[in-house]
Amino acid sequence: MRNIFYFFLLAFSFIVFGQNNKPLNVVFIAVDDLKPTIRSFGDAYAITPNMDMLARKSSLFLNMHTQQATCSPSRISLLTGLRPDKTQVYDLKTRMRDKLPNVVTLPQHFKNVGYTTAGVGKIFDPRGVDKNSDALSWSLPFKRAHQLNYPQPWGPPTIGDYQNEKIKKRINTIINSNDLKSGEAGDFLQTVYKPPFSSSPAPDEAYADGAIAAQAIRMIDGLSQNAKPFFLAVGFKRPHLPFSAPQKYWNFYKRERMPLALFQDRGQNIGKLAFKRAGEISKFPMDDRYYTTDSNGQLNLDSDFQRELVHGYYACVSFIDFQIGKIINKLKKEGLMDNTIIVIWGDHGFHLGDHRMWTKHSNFEQATRSPLIIYNPRTRAAQKIMSPTEFVDIFPTLTDMAQIAPALNVDGSSLLPLMMGLQQSIKDFAVSQYPRNQKMGYSFRTASYRYTLWINKTEIGQKITDKDIVQEELFDYSNDPLETKNHIGLKGYEVIYDEIKKKALAFLSPTAAPQPQPKPQAKKVSDGIRDLLANNDYNPNQVYVGATLNHRQLNTEVSKLFLDEFTYSTPENCAKQTRIHPKPGVWDWKKINDYLDFADKNNITLRIHGPISPQASHWAKTDSRTKEELEKNMVEYFTALCKRMNKEPSVKWMDVVNETITPEGAWFEEKPGFELWENPWEQIGRDENDVPLYISKAFEIANKYATKKSLVFNQHGGMEPKMWEKVKETIVYLKNKGYRIDGLGWQAHLRSNSPLALDKKQLDYFASLIDWAHEQGLDFHVTEIDYKIWDSVRSQTALKEQADAYANILKVLLSKRNQGVVTYNTWGMVDGLKGKHHDMYRFIFDSNRNPKPAYFALREAILNPDNELILK
């Protein structure tokens, strides 16, 4: 019922806003170190009118958490949809593609499906990627802040941060007197002079973030002129330290009114691993301010210094808010608000003195909680979502909203059901983690509680038990929102502690550990499936992967797409009796001749699907037909077909019969009338062993006139043992009678309401069927595979299961490639064509010819055929 409601709600939104046929753009805004200091998130001190205005038409995620509260691991996790234990990036030194050379990032995924992707500012942390901010992610060269234009007489900010003349002069003097090179200045200044805050009368554009906003606006001008949809990533640097912003934003606030953290103690019964020392903020020294620490190495700042820092943080938040406002106003001016998704996110939270901590680098609420705003132009619905969500959910959410192929194997879940009001929650908890002192702390944030456990790093990926836990914390946000005490051991918390801990230990099972990455492949993503086969040690005489086209698609954009991907095909129904010789005196070879010409011109290998089968003409199905009439028509048709195909160099295989046996193991027989699914050829009679004569006759004709072609016994159905045992018996019977049979075919018409391709028992039976065929000296053909989705919404789950089904069948087939010939033919290319089976989203490309998850799953199966099957 929910799915039906979801479908109609989406359909209504498309009608109202008139954009259902137009791809959605994405403007993706990252804000460095932004905690939820936004008025619409409940912060009464924050002056953020631009984000607040957008929030009135957006979904606000009030319990959103980063995967790790530090810049590079957090961003890489969000941009890959993978948790840190899979990215293996836990610090600011490790490069993403050193660990995951083949990972597909969020912007890269949009690029792969036809978007123009561009970026400016800080999206990836520059220390975690190449000098081009991960060149594979972008269609256009990424713009870093130091590459932008700055107004005169101000010029670019000193070391990227300061426009205050006094501070600039002092820093330049230090740099020059110590003969520091550009790459050395930052580290040296951290020990001498690098103020944690500053202001100046300079205009917005003289600061890095003002220049970033100006560049983003120019990029919107260019991108909006392109016919392709765009993904524009804009990364702002503040409110990261130093808190440097134009004076006018400082003037928004009165320093004496700035809020200080209400709880500035370590708390009761909280172990030392939970806390950070002075850390990052102490690397911003100035002459008249001092970072004193207590016996635990934590900061002990006086209230005036704290207020200066808090004032600077809020001033920077307002500064960024107004830069975001400029971008939103540009989208409005260009008429892009109706077809542009807007995402605003901070890469993690920020301590402002609570627990005597500043900046991030912990598993406390102030470090992991981050704001997320998502504007959906198709609904413009205001939602405040309180249930736990996490950064890995953003990747699948955006692919779901944009209605493009979802990414495979990401760790998150789409947030769209929450945004549409269809679900209150999509998960029990958000998971953050942070390494400290050779330990890893995993923190599980539910709607009301946070449970954190710490283990040795050496235990990551192992089965975790009580004895492996070196420290634990439990916080109750309903009764103790400031995290003043650890509730483990306190009366009344025994049940909740046991429940969360049990779920946490289950989550930290080996299945959640980092998975081995496939070896880098030589071929580019743009290569077709044919190229993957040719360049990955597949024997071209043993393995064939292709697709079916119908006559209408020849010499169209669909056939161009086919030629980019395949060199093997089966004409859709062009060679059947219904087309070529439907009744006495009527012959029509045009469609099959056109297909043969297409194959010859493009060097395509064909399997001809023109079997004697239930797919017969109305004339043949008419009840008054005599067996003599039927036999004459069948013999005329199939003799002519075999003679003609025998001369065609592009034809390698021919189906001789199809659908001869029912799932129950009985012969497929005739039925009254001509509208039902029936087999009229049964009326010709049966032989002494009760085998239908048309089967023997068809193979007799093929053996005599198709001497140069491989002959296939094709069968439609599932993995019904009774049916396949009858098929085997019939093949052995025919071979014993002296008829040549070269292959066994299976028409694999799959569907989402029947889990055949996701069920181990049925896949095992499928594997045994291939083994039997090869033992008999037969090729094995998956002659027609498609997968109907009965979920009208085409949910991400349904598309993922479709992809897994396509891939599982191919993996099983490829596992047998060294023992005999195997072929795999998708029964179509593109969704949405008119006809009896026109939709059900069956194929590997959508109606706009964009690749679906099934397409990428097939590629992955070819690249890594030994990967485990994905079962339901």
Image (cartoon, rainbow, N blue to C red):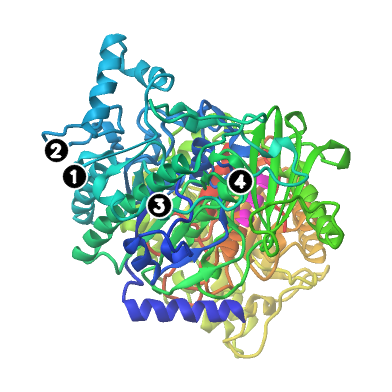
The image quadrant that residue 667 belongs to is: bottom right
- Discs 3/2, front: 3
Dot label at residue 315:
none
Residue 15 falls left or right of residue 522: left
Residue at 50%, 52% in the rendered image: 395
The residue where tag 3 is placed is: 256
Range shown magenta: 804-813
* Mark before the other along the chain sequence, 3 or 1: 1
Q: Does the residue at mark 2 contact the one at mark 1 (Cβ under 8 Å)?
A: yes
Frontmost residue, 77 versus 230? 77
The residue where tag 4 is placed is: 264
Q: Amino acid at mark 1?
A: Pro
* Mark before the other along the chain sequence, 4 or 2: 2
The image position of residue 112, as x and y in percent, is: 40, 47
The image position of residue 462, as x and y in percent, is: 79, 36
Q: Amino acid at mark 2?
A: Pro
Crowding at label 4, few (<14), some or many (≥20) Cα neighbours within 10 Å?
some
Q: Does the residue at mark 4 contact the one at mark 2 (Cβ under 8 Å)?
A: no
Marks 3 and 2, how far apart at CA: 33 Å
The residue where tag 1 is placed is: 203
- Discs 4/3, front: 3
Element type at mark 3 = helix
Marks 4 and 3, how far apart at CA: 19 Å
Q: Is residue 330 visible?
A: yes
Q: Is residue 615 magenta?
A: no
- Discs 3/1, front: 3
Dot label at residue 151:
2
Frontmost residue, 424 versus 80? 424
